[in-house]
Image (cartoon, rainbow, N blue to C red):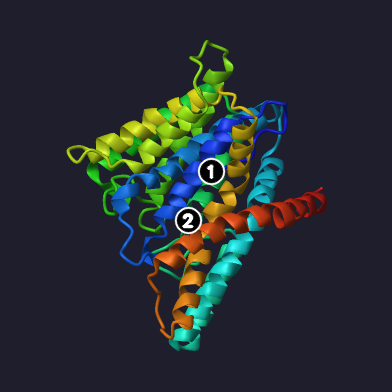
Amino acid sequence: MSDATKTTTRNFVTLDGLRGVAALAIAVRHAPFLWERGYPLTVLSESYLAVDFFFVLSGFVLAHAYGPRLSEGMGFRQFITVRLIRFSPLYWLSALLGFAAAAGGFLALGLSGAWLQALLRNLVFALLWLPTAFYPAALFPLNSPAWSLLQELIANALLVWTRTSLKRCIPLVAAAAVGLAVAVGFGWFGFGAASGAMDAGSGWASFPAGLLRALYSFFAGSVTYRLWQSGKPRPPLPPLLPAALLCAILILPAPAAFPAAYDLLVTLLGFPLLVYLAAGTAPARRLAALFAWLGRVSYGVYVLQMPLYVGISYFAGWRAGGDRFIHSDFHAGLAVLALLVLATLLDRYYVVPFRRFLTRAGS
């Protein structure tokens, strides 16, 4: 998930709105363990594909925002520093919150000090942007969605090499597309083991799956921007139509007869086409303001969701006199609402000042 461009006056407001919709879909998807009657995953069965949509958006917007500067020789260190400044304030906070929530839960359960030492080791790795070496299952046990941020940074590093050149991006996209199709088709690297055909990437065993997802979608987004930039006529669309199409993709279940083929079709063709068409839409003032807000809070919603959910669940269980997660519709709704409020406040009062501080410190 990347910033709207700062290099020109062009502002992809509809894409900002789509980013927010995708982030909310994932945030609601990850809340089911809080719901009293068990929130049905079938309602958002395809919402994990929102991560692939994020990668496409990121590749598109970064090609616009940094393509000219990369072509003119912007270096690896400078570009990665910019990206780390973009990601780190909320990412570091999410790691600390994840540690606090897990530590509080472990203390409530009366577990030994060895668990807290393990948490501290995981925290150190997380703050350094490294997947933990002390947990066999998850790359980032304090905040599992952070796996996609690591893959985003890997794709960002390769973007410096490609410099958004079609001669380099197209072979990379083609190779990643073939690798993704084969891996999903044969169920390699953890594909097909979770709730969806392409729901993989958060653990050590599925790291190659996450890498394939990121490389294809990110550079497909970069190629999509270059095609969009060519100025060929595009059909005018109502701004709400791309949002409705994205919601339909993320909400409706894949056809039972060919779920893997459906996921691949959406990822390989559907998302790049949706971004291509949505980029040229111009929402009216009120809708533009809503889309802009959704874009601003989208990263916070995505990166803070799990630490907040775990913290609320443990706190609610403690208040109820228990020692486990509590399942409550009220607390589930409260968690999603609190996530939106928290992301909004942090964007204004924490993220912007912290990024300015990091920019000055790195200059």
* 244 or 304: nearer the viewer: 244
User: Which residue was labeled with disc 2?
Assistant: 145
* 3 or 133: nearer the viewer: 3
**Who's the residue at 63% across and 34% down the image?**
286
What amino acid does circle 1 point to? Answer: Gly
Quarter of the picture containing the N terminus is: top right
Q: Quadrant of residue 332?
A: bottom left
Vertical side of 319 occupied by 220: above or below: above
The residue lying furthest to the top in this view is 233
Residue 363: x and y in percent read 82, 47
**Who's the residue at 48% across and 14% down the image?**
235
Residue 40: x and y in percent read 30, 55
Of the numbered discs 2 and 1, the one sitting upstream in the chain is 1
Disc 2 is placed on an element classified as: helix
Q: Is 165 left or right of 70, judged from the image as shown?
A: left
Q: Is 196 left or right of 9, judged from the image as shown?
A: left
Residue 168: x and y in percent read 52, 26
Residue 146: x and y in percent read 51, 56
User: Which residue was labeled with disc 1?
Assistant: 20
* 333 or 9: nearer the viewer: 333
Whether residue 304 can be seen here: no
Disc 1 is placed on an element classified as: helix
